[in-house]
Image (spheres, rainbow, N blue to C red):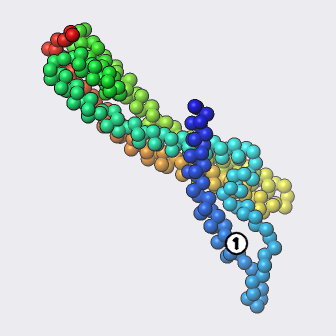
Amino acid sequence: MKMIRWVLLLFAGVCFLGMAVPTVHAQDDAGQGAGQLVDADGQAVQQTADTGGSGSFLAVVFRSGPMALLLWLAIFGSAGCAVYFAVDCAITVRPVRIMPQSLIDAVTAAMGEGDVIKALKCCDDEPGPLANVLSAGFSHVEEGYEVIEEAISTAASLETEKLMQKITWLSVVGNLAPMLGLLGTVQGMIAAFGTLAGGAPDVGLLAQNISQALFTTAAGLTIAVPCVAFYYVYRNSANKIVLRMEALTMESIKDLRHVEVVED
């Protein structure tokens, strides 16, 4: 199952960065058309140099050596992780997912009747972050209000940490992607200077090395910018939801000072 997940992440990264390929090919075709030579009479002269698409995105990925290919795989993987974590946060970091209204209504009705057992059963029937926090309080109803508050505080901290861990992965990817791009830049420049050190340089190989350096930088930034933006959006949303959950929990347990457990 984990292998399938990583394959999907890699595929998503390839699709994410592969959107740049048509644009690059279009620029190559335009450059070839604009690079025609003309003679003294203004007639076009056929070029004998074979470009072979050596400056295209796919050529840079697959013709830059094994180390560069491994680096590109890492960049594709980080892009796939960025897509996965962004979609996961979009699904999980929502008030309706963390604080379902049906659970709030059921617990409110049960507490209005003074039936803690019924409220606890409602939490068991609809598990989730809010249900876990409320269950922690209802489970200690016979131990006093201070114990209830402490149990709820511990459960709320645990659920908050779980929620923030999902969002933090976006920040991790957003920090790693530019580093991978910078590593590709360094690797490309090392290869470029190595080409120059060999005497009369191969202009095509030199241009490919520089393209490798620039493409990896662009790819890393392309991944990092959305990750950082999504991280702050989801973090602020999560903070608001957590504050609402804590307020709702305290409102629900305030009546436990005078509630007696109803036995069937």
Which residue lies at the image location 27% right of the left edge and 19% below the top edge? 120
In the rendered image, which quarter is residue 242 located in?
top left
Q: Nearer the viewer, residue 121 or 51?
A: 121
Which residue lies at the image location 63% right of the left edge and 54% below the top edge? 215
On screen, residue 215 versus residue 240, left or right, reads: right
Q: Is residue 6 above or below residue 30?
A: above
Circle 1 sits in a helix, a strand or a loop, which is it?
A: helix
Q: Nearer the viewer, residue 103 or 189?
A: 103
Q: In the rendered image, which quarter contains the C terminus?
A: top left
On screen, residue 79 versus residue 154, left or right, reads: right
Which residue lies at the image location 23% right of the left edge and 9% below the top edge? 142
The amino acid on which the numbered mark 1 sits, given as a three-letter code, is Gln
Q: Is residue 6 above or below residue 193?
A: above
Q: Is residue 44 above or below residue 137?
A: below
On screen, residue 23 versus residue 63, left or right, reads: left
Q: Which residue is mark 1?
A: 32
Q: In the rendered image, which quarter contains the N terminus?
A: top right
* Farthest bottom residue in view: 41
Image spot of residue 152 (x, y percent)? 29, 20
